[in-house]
Amino acid sequence: MVSRTSRAPIALFLVALGACTRPASKTPDASAAPAARVDSLADAMFAARLELEPEFGTEAGLTKGNHSAIRDNSPAGIQAVHARWDAMYAAARTIDPALLAGRTEWATYGMVREAL
């Protein structure tokens, strides 16, 4: 079984890859709002991972990471991390993936749901 921690870098990579290949749109469509929510959620996941697992930033060679900290492995810290991921999962479940059909955010959404 693959842990949440080991799946997250793959999901974040695919989210970044999807952002790089987004086609330009001249007119807004019905999927624009859900797509923006998916992008926002993916950004929030990345920021949360840097905050909750500071060593991730160091391992990934990110310049903005907190390189002098480690994750809180206390029972309260672990519970706080689970609550944060659960809240993001609940937000992801409110997005209808059918509205994302044909957009790169559809793949991002799938990776976000899987990572959470």
Image (spheres, grey):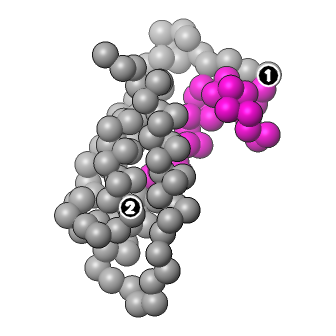
Give how far across and how far down residue 53 sits, in percent.
60, 26
Whole-number angstrom distance, CA of label 1 to CA of label 2: 34 Å
Give how far across and how far down residue 38 sits, in percent.
40, 58
**Residue at point 54%, 52% (across, down):** 16
The crowd level at tag 1 (other Cα within 10 Å; few <14, some 14-19, many 20+) is few
- Is 41 left or right of 94, judged from the image as shown? right
Give how far across and how far down residue 28 sits, in percent.
39, 85
Give how far across and how far down residue 25 sits, in percent.
45, 83
Residue type at numbered disc 2: Glu
**Residue at point 35%, 54% (across, down):** 107
Residue bearing mark 1? 68
Q: Does the magenta stretch include residue 42?
A: yes
18 or 42, nearer to the observer:
18
- Is 86 left or right of 71, judged from the image as shown? left
Instruction: Please give the count of numbered marks on the rendered protein.
Output: 2
**Residue at point 74%, 33% (across, down):** 61
Residue bearing mark 2? 105
Magenta span: 41-67
The crowd level at tag 2 (other Cα within 10 Å; few <14, some 14-19, many 20+) is many
Name the image quarter holding the N terminus.
top left
Q: Does the magenta stretch include residue 14?
A: no
Viewer can see residue 45: no
**Residue at point 37%, 75% (across, down):** 32
- Residue 115 vs 4, above or below: the answer is below
- Residue 59 vs 34, above or below: the answer is above
- Residue 61 vs 5, above or below: the answer is below
